[in-house]
Image (spheres, helix red, strand yellow):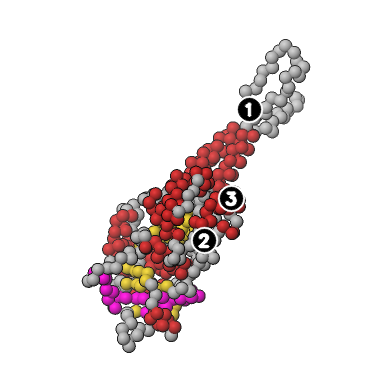
Amino acid sequence: MAEINTEGKGSGKKGKPKKMSTRVDFTPMVDLGFLLITFFMLATSMIKPQTMELAMPSKDKPKAGEESVVKASRAVTIVLGKDNKVFYWEGKQEGDKKPTVVTSNFSSTGIRKYLIERNFEIMTKVRDLDKQRIPQHMPDSTYNRKKKDFLRLKSSPIVIIKVTDQATYKNLIDILDEMAICNIGSYAIVDITPDDLAMIKQ
Amino acid sequence: MPKVKVKRKSTALDMAPMCDMAFLLLTFFILTSNFIQKEVVQVSTPSSISEIKIPERDIMLILIDKSNHVFFGIDGQETRKEVLSEVGNAYGIEFSKKELEEFSVVNNFGLPISGMKKFLSLSAEQRDMAENAIGIPTDSIDNQLKQWVKAGRAVNPNARIAIKADQGCAYPIIKKVMNSLQDLQENRYNLITSLEENPEKINIK
């Protein structure tokens, strides 16, 4: 069937030109094909890495009167400590009135539970939207716009993230992730102050 | 009664369809492939639920490894050459044509500009050695990372900045890098992460 004609040229039968078969043995070609496939499979990366987009405020000092003031009732401060610890408190520190600091962690019953409860109104709205959504009828752009409108609602907390020097990069990513999971629209990463360090020491 | 003749079948197969298939797959892999870019250090990124894909081109990659060393890389061979000569100018170091040529194949590197000439004279294997992975200085006195990003931005205005840091690396170094970027008015950048399922979405399903 597919074997190659291996007889040498001068193999005896004289005169009569031998009818050569037109069939070629494909086996070496298949070998080569699979070898190359293996190479390309190993050398390529099919999955592109994921990214998280981050927009930081610019360093220019805001002009007087243009600073955004965070209302104490909406403010939630989260401090990332060492050993994956998270501290949070509501409101602001003003004079003697000190908010109570809660120690928490990155588990689903830790900071996430608190944020979901704090942001419950928007969470339910987004959940309803997700449930109702039929991808064929609602393109991504509409979905994202609707979600964004929810995130702007006044009842959502404004989260101020402060990271101590003992925290790791993973902690930072985790907390940014929690912001996405808990549908928190406004958050900022802010430099830590000695006051905050004193707060978490307690 | 005549004997029933069992026809002898040849054991040789027709390889043509298999060959077709092999080359079909091969074509597919060649067309869809984008090669794994070699990185000087192994970095295990933290996972996040973000599903945004990073573009393939025009990336300025800032790598930060476990021991808090900073590496820099930009894509495009011509871009790399221009970036190096620009940074060389800033520090008063002239790079020869051969050195620029060598630099255009370096995916990412992590060493001060003063050691760059020596680094480029090494062979590809020697470059991977640990002593060449000492990190780009990011201190406020001598912030070379800033120079690199500035040059990268000047040469390729469309480049996006991506930070790929190890999950274990300490926050101060991240802060330093972020501050350097902020000084350059680069306020939007990407953090490279690996994928993790959104716990909210699982609940809904």
For residue B59, say whether it is visible. Answer: no
Q: Which mark is residue B187?
A: none
Q: Position of B98 compared to A74: left or right?
A: right
Total numbered circles: 3
Q: Regarding mark 1 in the picture, which secondary structure is present there?
A: loop
**Front position among marks 3 and 1:** 3
Where residue A194 sits, quadrant-wise, is bottom left
Badge 2: how crowded within 10 Å, few (<14), some, or many (20+)?
many
- Which chain hosts label 1? A
Looking at the picture, which amino acid does disc 3 mark? Answer: Leu
Q: Is residue A201 visible?
A: yes
Residue A152, placed above or below residue B89: below
Magenta highlight range: A66-89
- The reply to whether dot 3 and dot 2 touch (C-beta < 8 Å) is no
Answer with mark 3 or mark 2, whichever residue precedes in sequence.
Answer: 3
Q: Are marks 3 and 1 in contact (CB under 8 Å)?
A: no
* Gap in angstroms between the C-alphas marked 3 and 1: 49 Å
Q: Amino acid at mark 2?
A: Gly
Q: Is residue B103 left or right of residue A132?
A: right
Which residue is disc 1 drawn over? Answer: A24
Residue at label 3? B122
Q: Position of residue B142 (x, y in %)?
A: 45, 63
Residue sitting at 35 percent across and 83 percent down? A99
Q: Which of the two residues, A131 or A58, is positioned nearer the viewer here?
A: A58
